[in-house]
Image (cartoon, helix red, strand yellow):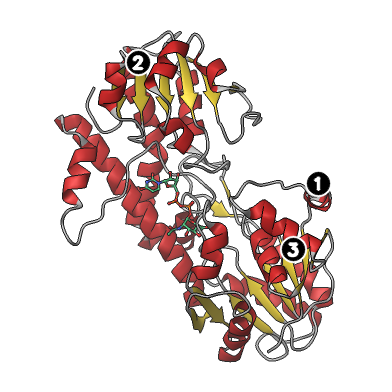
Amino acid sequence: MNFKKICVFGLGYIGLPTASTFATHGLDVVGVDVNPRVIETLRNGGLHIHEPGLRTLVGAAIKSGKLTVATQPAEADAFIIAVPTPFKLKEKANSIPEADMSYVTSAAEAITPHLRKGNLVVLESTSPPRTTVELVAPILERSGLTAGEDFHLVYSPERVLPGQILRELIENARVIGGITPASAQAGRDLYAAFVKGDIILTDATTAEMVKLMENTTRDVNIAIANEFARLADRFGVDVWEAISLANRHPRIDILRPGPGVGGHCISVDPWFFVEAAPDLTDLIHTARRVNDSQPHFVADLTRRALGGLQGRKIAALGLAYKPDVDDLRESPAVKVAHLLQEAGASVVAFEPFKPDADLPGLQLAPTLENALAEADAAILLVGHTQLKELEPARVAALIPGRILIDTVNGWDAENWEQAGFRVFKLGVNP
Ligand code: SAJ
C-alpha cells in the first residue's frame, strides 16, 4: 500500500516524534491533540515536552509544510493512535488499578466519521490484551465498515526509550500485529517509510502481549534488584559491589536498585496484566508492590542516616522518574520527597530539567544553591548527569550539613568523604 496522508492522534512523547518522523520522510501528516494549548505551543514554534533532538525534528517537519497540527482530525490514508493509557486508582484500599482507556476510546470515536474503505488504523498505545479486537474494532465499525475487510487495523507497540526516542524510533525492531495478515502487511508498508530495524508481523493480540511482557519483565527484574538492596543492607553487604560481581556470571544481568520505578510505562503496564488476570499474576503483582514500596525503604534509610527526620532540612536532588529526562510522572523521587515531609522533615527539592515544576505540597528551589542552602543533608534521588558530576568542594561550600544519601549509586563515596561528607548509599548498611 502507498500512504500519502496520515493523521496521528496524541502529540506527546510518542505521537509527536512519530508524526514528525513520518513528515520528514515525505508523508503529509496531521498531528491531532485534544489539548488546544499543545497545538498553540507547537504552532508558535514551541515544544511542550523535553526530548533530545525533538525541537530540531519538529521544527524541520513543520517548516517543510509536511506536518500540520490541529485539534480535529481530517481524512487520511492511515490513522495512528498514540494517546496515553494511564491507570485509575480504585477507591477501595489494596484494589488493583484499572486501565483508563478513555483516550483510546475517544480517539477511535474521532476517527470513525473519517474512516474510508482501504484505510489503515494503527493503535500504538500500550493496552490490555485484546483491546484492538474488543474495544477499538467495534468502535471503528460504527462507521458501517468491517475491520479486516473494508479497512485494515493493527496494533503496533511503541518501544522507544525516553531520552533516546528519535534514534530508537528508527532503529528498533517494530512488531506489527494485524487483525488479519493483510492488515499486518498494510502496517508494514506504512512503517517501512522510516523504520530501519526489522519489521516483524504477527496478530494484534500477540503484539499487545509482547509490549506488556517487555515492560513487565523489566519491572520484575528491577524489583529483584531492589529486594537485593534491602537484603544487602540487612546483611552488611555493599549491593553495588555484589551486583557487579554477580554480573560477571555469563548468564546473569541484574539491574540497578534505586528509589523505585516510575514513568508512565513500567510502573503502569504490569497492572494491565494483573487487572486482566488477577488469578494468574502473583509474581507480577508482588513485583509491583516491591517497587511501589521502595520509596518507603529510601525514606527509612534517610531516617537512619540522619538519626531521625523531625525538623531536619533536606535537599532533594532530582525529581524526574529517571536520569536526564524532565518527566515527573509516577516518579518515585517525588514520592520519597513527600514521605520525608510527612515524617516531619522540611524538604526543598531541585529538579534541573524542570526547576519550576508545580508539585502541590512540595517546595521546589529554582537553583541547586537555593536547595542546598541551610540543608542538614542532601539526598540524590535521580542520577542526572549534571548531579552525578557535581564537585564535592562546590557542594561543601553551599550546604551547611555534611550528610549525603545516594539512592542511585551516582557518587563516588570516597571522593565525597575526602571533602568532609558522610555518604549513605542505598543497599549499603549505614
Ligand atoms: N530503573 C531502575 N533500575 C534499572 C532500570 C530502570 O530502578 O536498572 C527505573 C528507572 O529509574 C525508572 C523506571 O525504572 O524509574 C523505568 O525506566 P526505564 O528506563 O527502565 O524505562 P522507561 O519507562 O523509560 O521505558 C520503558 C522501556 N521498556 C523497556 O526497556 C522494556 C521502553 O523501551 C518502552 O518503550 C517504554 O518503557 C514504554 O513506552 O513502554
Q: State which tag comes first along the sequence, 1 or 3.
A: 1
Residue underneath mark 3:
61
Tell me: is circle 2 under 8 Å from ligand 1: no
Of marks 1 and 2, the one in the foreground: 2
Q: Residue at x 78, y 52 (%)?
A: 42
Q: Quadrant of the C terminus?
A: top left
Q: Residue at x 22, y 38 (%)?
A: 239
Kindly report the distance in space between the C-alpha atoms of the residues bearing marks 1 and 3: 19 Å
Kindly report the distance in space between the C-alpha atoms of the residues bearing marks 1 and 2: 43 Å
> Could you tell me the amino acid type at mark 1?
Arg
Residue 379 sits above or below residue 165 on the image: above
Q: Residues within 10 Å of mark 1 (few under 14, many from 20)?
A: few
Q: Residues within 10 Å of mark 2 (few under 14, many from 20)?
A: many
Q: Secondary structure at mark 3?
A: helix
Residue 72 sits above or below residue 141 on the image: above
Kindly report the distance in space between the C-alpha atoms of the residues bearing marks 3 and 2: 48 Å
Residue 136 sits above or below residue 397 on the image: below
State the image quarter where residue 215 is shown. bottom left
Instruction: List x then y, in percent, for residue 265.
Output: 51, 53
Instruction: List x then y, in percent, for residue 210.
Output: 45, 70
Residue underneath mark 2:
403
> 252 and 260: which one is in front?
252
Tell me: is circle 1 under 8 Å from ligand 1: no
> Could you tell me the amino acid type at mark 3?
Ala
Q: Secondary structure at mark 2?
A: strand
Residue 37 numbered tag: 1
Instruction: List x then y, in percent, for residue 114.
Output: 83, 76
> Could you tell me the amino acid type at mark 2?
Ile
